[in-house]
Amino acid sequence: MRKKLIRYTGSLLFLVSLLPAQYVKLVPDPGFVPYATYYMSSIDLSTGASDVQFFGFRLAEKSGNYKNFKEVWASLEFEVSLLSRSLAVTEPTTVIKMQTAPFQMKADVRISNTLLSLQTTSLFDMAVPPNEIPLSVRSFESIDIGKFEDLLSAVVTTGKLSDGNYTFRVLVRSGPSSDEGSLIVSDEVIETIIVTTPTSLNLLAPGGALADTSQNVIFSSYPIFQWETEPCPGCESFIRVAKFDSESHSSPEEAIGDVTILPMDQTKGWEPAGLATNFQYPLSDAIDLEPGEMYVWQAQKKLPTTEGNDAFTSPIFAFKLADLTETPTTGFDAMHPVLQQLMELMGEGQFNAYFGPEGDLNGFDPAGTYVIDDMEVSVDEIFKVLRQFSEGSSSIISISVQ
């Protein structure tokens, strides 16, 4: 009798192991949605309610066939935690944590933070027609902002989430019954979003201050505009260029706010530059730059936020396109602009030691091909390097003539 009982029990366990298990997973729909800035007006910390989507998923039983099971049950858990050294929050701290009571699934269910709050009483699945799913949401934990004075001050002053690391966690448990003890973790998605407030948008080249036009001469009719800024998710850059006429414009601001040559369409205001931090002046569909003329340019950055786009602009740079048809015959002005820059950089004495009557480079004309680190570059790149020397960001170690 004992042997038969053992064999029977073993067969029963084997049959149970063959039964399909309910396994509900999180399918991105669209997943987490990043923003550069999060406004607190978009979030109710007391209930978790929000009218802006931070995440969206589809709850789906792995097999896709709900008829394989007598019942499929699931529960959700959502948590946001914060780490921000600038706010003296040096350990991960829960901002809000919510969990639903178990609910029965008869078809896939779309979920998002906009559908889940302490006020949520039901969801609808994706069946045709949809089934209403009674839902109960309870709060496990929420931050006591009063204990974090820096965080409270930042929120009150700016109305935005402060800089820091915000971790979003969505977890689903699933099983065969409404008994919470029968539900096991079947999927979990964690996403950490680094919130940094972009504060800088600095132009690099070409150009500089309007008053310093001698240092801001370029030789290419199709210059590459370059700027630098902090990276941020979904941010886009824009550029605009205008002609500066000293008789019509009293300042760079007045010129850039007048008629732009890029974009040509005055209704656009700005030319899109995408996610890049550089933009080459177009070879077509743009007004040609004229030799001998002064121009001003500016960059703009747009940041996606929970309340639409924010935008801020850079300072304005000015540059002059060299007129190579103007050729003075004597003196400093008759020298090639590269030699002029070298003389100002090296000093007249050291310059003459190389380029003067007794120098190895007497009569040298810097026309032709320029090479830096075995790579051919434009003359504008040479001026950029020379400007680094004059500004002190680079220094001359030695000079050799080959």
Image (cartoon, grey):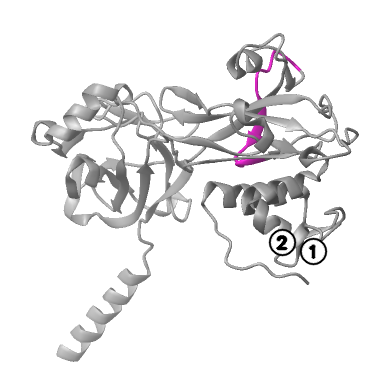
Q: Position of residue 202 (x, y in %)?
A: 52, 36
> What residue sits right under mark 2 in the picture?
353
Left/right of residue 167 with respect to residue 93 in the rendered view: right
The magenta-colored residue range is: 265-278
> What residue sits right under mark 1 in the picture?
358
Q: Judge by depth and name the residue closer to the eye, 321 or 8.
A: 321
Q: Main secondary structure of the magenta part?
A: loop
- Where 381 sits versus 144, above or below? below
Q: Is residue 275 magenta?
A: yes
Left/right of residue 135 with respect to residue 32 in the rendered view: left
Give the quadrant of the N terminus: bottom left
Q: Position of residue 277 (x, y in %)?
A: 60, 41
- Residue 287 figure quarter: top right
Which residue is located at x 79 percent, y 64 percent? Answer: 358
Q: Is residue 322 magenta?
A: no
Which residue is located at x 54 percent, y 56 percent? Answer: 394
Which residue is located at x 48 percent, y 28 percent? Answer: 129
Judge the density around disc 2: few (<14), some (14-19), many (≥20) Cα neighbours within 10 Å: some
SS at mark 2 in the image:
helix
- Residue 139 figure quarter: top left
Q: Is residue 100 visible?
A: no
For the residues labelled 1 and 2, say whether their Cβ atoms are less than 8 Å apart: yes
Q: Position of residue 170 (x, y in %)?
A: 32, 46
Label 1 and label 2: CA atoms lie apart by: 7 Å
Q: Position of residue 3 (x, y in %)?
A: 19, 91
Left/right of residue 161 with respect to residue 110 in the rendered view: left
Q: Is residue 153 visible?
A: yes
SS at mark 1 in the image:
loop
Give the quadrant of the C terminus: bottom right
Q: Judge by depth and name the residue closer to the eye, 67 or 266.
A: 266
